[in-house]
Image (cartoon, rainbow, N blue to C red):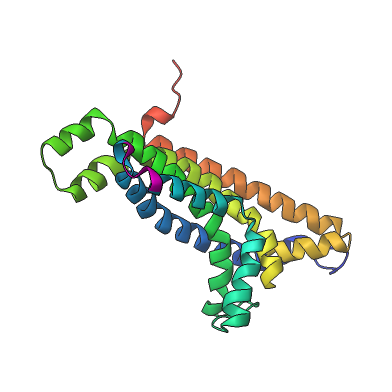
Amino acid sequence: SVRLQRPVADVLAQRFPTTLLLAVLAFIIAVIGALPAGIGAAVLARSGRRRGLSMTLSAVLGILIAVPSFLVAVGLISLFAVQLGWLPAAGWGKPADAVLPVIALAIGPMAYLVRIVQVEMLAVLDTTYMTTARAKRLPRRLIYLRHALPNIVTASLTVGGLILAGLTAATVLIETVFAIPGLGTIMVSSVGAKDYPMVQGVVIVYALIVLGVNLVVDVILATIDPRSSITEG
């Protein structure tokens, strides 16, 4: 590193766990919120019912997807840190420090994943085997969790892998806004200082994360659904 006079690998090894933890926590929050919300929205809007509710939900999700994460972060800081004083506006080290960054990072991906789960669930609910399950008067919990949920896993997992990879890269802005000592802040400061070896190192790490996540997702999909893999011969 031109600016720090330290090996790039040492600096990245020190900061990478913070970025990874931030991205993983945001991903977990996004998945936990998106699955029940998407399934519930699909069940309520099944067969064209509650069109007003469905259109309102689509509009809200579209807005949440379109709003940049750094703008969400500024809004959260203004409300919960400045006005209410409930949470710290910056820093890293205590559990409370992670609340606002994780929420700011998770809102957009969660809205996108809700939409994907809703669309996939609507398609599953109209299938013949779901009609048969309802005709047998099986409990709703059994119908949705045992028969419907496994059939939306493939699409949701594929999108989830892309979201996790994207979240890791999106931490650049969130870390800068909340002054979190991760890869994002070191990259921004290195760009300003023209510390090109550090910038190159961070970019390589982000690229490896994207490739690694995509590889893991492909392996998982091939394991749980052999039809997703292409067999030659």
Figure check: 77 above or below 200: below
The percent position of residue 51, horizontal first and vertical second, equals 37, 42
Magenta: main secondary structure equals helix
Quarter of the N terminus within the rendering = bottom right
Q: Is residue 173 positioned above or below 150 on the image?
A: below
**Is residue 180 at least partly visible in the picture?**
no
Question: Which of the pair 178/19 is nearer the observer?
Answer: 178
- Image quadrant assignment for residue 187: bottom right
Q: Which residue is drawn at 52% across and 78% down?
A: 95
Viewed as shown, does residue 119 lie left or right of 89? Answer: left
The image position of residue 15, as x and y in percent, is 67, 67
Q: In the picture provided, is 99 more to the left or to the right than 77?
A: left
Residue 135 horizontal/vertical position (percent): 13, 35
Residue at the limit of the structure toward the top, as seen here: 233
Count the numbered circles shown: 0
Q: Quadrant of the C terminus?
A: top left
Residue at screen point 45% across, 49% down: 56
Residue 121: % across, % down: 35, 40
Residue farthest along the left direction in this orientation: 136
Q: In this view, does 147 lie to the left or right of 13?
A: left
Residue 167, quarter of picture: bottom right
Q: Can residue 221 be spotted in the picture?
A: yes
Q: What stretch is highlighted in magenta?
A: 48-52
Give the residue at x 62% y 68%.
75
Instruction: Residue at the far front: name it.
Output: 52
Q: Judge left or right: residue 85 versus residue 141.
A: right
Q: Does the magenta stretch include residue 51?
A: yes
Magenta stretch: includes residue 101 = no
Residue 133 figure quarter: top left
Residue at 46% of width from left, 18% of height from top? 232
196 vs 173, nearest the viewer: 173
